């Protein structure tokens, strides 16, 4: 567990340095990673120069209240690339960030109400370029999945920053 946490922090430092050097900003909306993406990005000294804000969007009510979603959007199936992209676009627009980042899935020990197994997540980064992906860990270990989800979402962002 310690190795994965260290890896997450190293990755966040790399991303933070890139965002600062490019004078770009980020907004984060996450779900099953429970705030780990935001927490990792905020461990970087000088994070206030690039981190505009974010939230853990864990329920349908949070979709309404924090993202301003319509009933149609609230009813969308979460944990898909389409939904993750919509959320990333929305949080980016709401905070006026260069990048919007979203993670949404089922950390475990059980799956979600859509039938996705524990260890399933969808992630998206939206900005000057867009990218989304699905991760299936095959594990029902909640803590490990949360860390993997956060790390994978940051890897997705880094791949765009490096392109």
Image: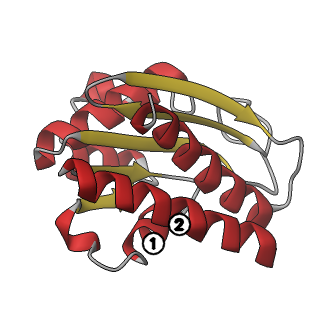
The one of 22 and 151 positioned closer to us in this rendering: 22
Where's residue 33, x and y in %?
58, 58
Quarter of the rendering occupied by the C terminus: top left
Q: Is residue 2 above or below residue 78?
A: below
Residue at image position (86%, 53%) is 140
Where's residue 96, x and y in %?
10, 44
Question: Horizontally, is 135 left or right of 16 in the view?
Answer: right
The total number of labels drawn is 2
Question: Horizontally, is 154 left or right of 160 in the view?
Answer: right
The one of 115 and 88 positioned closer to us in this rendering: 88
Quarter of the rendering occupied by the N terminus: bottom right
- Specify few, some or many for label 2: CA neighbours under 10 Å numbering under 14, 14-19, or 20 or more: many
Residue at disc 1, secondary structure: helix
Residue at image position (69%, 72%) is 5
Residue at image position (51%, 32%) is 78
In this figure, which residue is indicated by the disc labeled 1? 39
Q: Is residue 122 above or below residue 102?
A: above
In this figure, which residue is indicated by the disc labeled 2? 36
Q: Give the spatial CA distance, label 2 vs label 1.
A: 5 Å
Instruction: Check the image and name the residue furthest to the front.
Output: 21
Tell me, yes or no, whether the two marked residues, 2 and 1, touch with CB atoms within 8 Å. yes
Question: Horizontally, is 127 left or right of 97 in the view?
Answer: right
Q: Quadrant of residue 51?
A: bottom left
Where's residue 81, x and y in %?
52, 23
Q: Is residue 122 above or below residue 24?
A: above
Instruction: Say whether residue 76 is visible.
Output: no
Residue at disc 2, secondary structure: helix
Question: Horizontally, is 162 left or right of 69 in the view?
Answer: right
Where's residue 154, x and y in %?
53, 49
Q: Which mark is residue 48?
A: none
- Specify few, some or many for label 1: CA neighbours under 10 Å numbering under 14, 14-19, or 20 or more: few
């Amino acid at each position: 567990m310690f190795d994965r946490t260290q890896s997450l922090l190293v990755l966040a430092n790399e991303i933070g340095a890139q965002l600062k050097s490019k004078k770009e900003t980020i907004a984060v909306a996450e779900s099953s990673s429970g705030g780990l993406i935001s927490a990792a990005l905020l461990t970087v000294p000088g994070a206030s120069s690039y981190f505009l804000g974010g939230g853990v969007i864990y329920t349908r009510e949070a979709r309404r209240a924090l993202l301003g979603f319509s009933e149609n959007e609230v009813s969308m199936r979460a944990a898909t690339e389409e939904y993750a992209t919509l959320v990333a676009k929305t949080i980016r627009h709401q905070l006026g960030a260069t990048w919007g980042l979203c993670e949404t899935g089922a950390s475990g020990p059980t799956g979600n109400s859509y039938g996705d197994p524990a260890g399933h997540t969808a992630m998206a980064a939206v900005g000057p370029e867009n990218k989304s992906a699905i991760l299936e860990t095959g594990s029902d270990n909640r803590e490990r999945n949360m860390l993997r989800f956060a790390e994978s979402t940051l890897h997705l962002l880094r791949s765009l920053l490096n392109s």
